[in-house]
Structure formats: C-alpha cells, structure tokens
Image: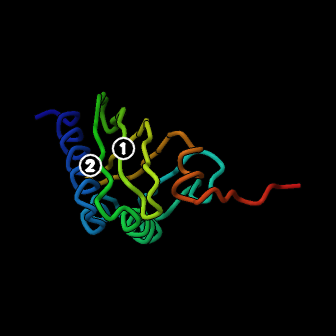
Amino acid sequence: MSIEEENKRRVEAFFDAMNAADSQRIAAAYAEDGTCWTSGNTLISGTLTKPQIVAGASAVLDVFPEGLAFTVHAMTAEGERVAVEAESNGQHVSGKWYRNLYHFLFEFRNGKLLRLKEYMDTEQITDVLCGGERPPQAE
C-alpha cells in the first residue's frame, strides 16, 4: 500500500474517532509534538499543542450530547499530506444546530499526525460553540 493510501486510512480512522467522540483515539493519532491550527479570530482559533488538543477535543465533543457527525466528501493525498473536504452536523447543548463546512489539511510524520490545519465558517464557531462571544478586539 502506498504512503498516500496509508495516510488516507489514518484520516478515515481520525474521523471515526471524532464521530465516536473518542478523545483518547484522537489524541493517540497525534505525534508528541503534533499541533492543530484553527483558522479565524474566534475563541478557539490559533495553534494548540497535543496536551491542549486532548483537553480541547473533549470540551468541544462534550457539548454535543447526541454527537457531532462528520461526513468526508473528498480526500486528496500527496506524500505525507492529505487534504479533506468535510462537513459536520450536530445539536449543541444550547439547542442550536451546528452545521459547518471544512477544509482540513493533515500532515503526517512516521504514521502520526504532525500538523492539522482546519478551515471553516468561523461565524458558525462564534454563534454556536462560543455562544456569540468574540475575542477582545485589539486597539
């Protein structure tokens, strides 16, 4: 099996863990020096280290009592990188529905997730996940 096919399988396993709200499997996918970067200017934007990812994954997934379902629409792989088009759907504890469209870029090293970049509709993040709260504006 090619490295591209192996990495696509790793991405599928990652989304299986997300759909199962299994923060331990999500954490296990990352290299010890792995990071996750989230786009935008929201309360959850920026770069997280592996310990922060573990805490953050649990916190985000816990606010979807019925689960947050991810659907992968397309994957393209080249070497250690896999690009993914996906969407999510789930009911937040607030009662609001959270639906978002994503582009993820996974970068692997030695079979572990080294970097994950997450691009999405940041207004959905702010409105639902952050309850409308925004980071303070720089003056």
Residue to which mark 2 is pinned: 15
Q: Are marks 2 and 1 in contact (CB under 8 Å)?
A: no
Determine the residue positioned at 47% across, 62% down.
94
Which mark, residue 88? 1
Identity, as a three-letter code, of the amino acid under mark 1: Ser
Q: Nearer the viewer, residue 132 or 36?
A: 132
Toward the right, the furthest residue is 139
Determine the residue positioned at 32% across, 65% down.
65
Secondary structure found at label 1: strand
Determine the residue positioned at 30% across, 66% down.
23
Q: Quadrant of the N terminus?
A: top left
Q: Nearer the viewer, residue 95 or 105?
A: 95
Identity, as a three-letter code, of the amino acid under mark 2: Phe
Q: Residues within 10 Å of mark 1 (few under 14, many from 20)?
A: some
Residue 42: give x, y in percent of width and height.
Answer: 63, 53
* Nearest to N terminus: mark 2 or mark 1: 2
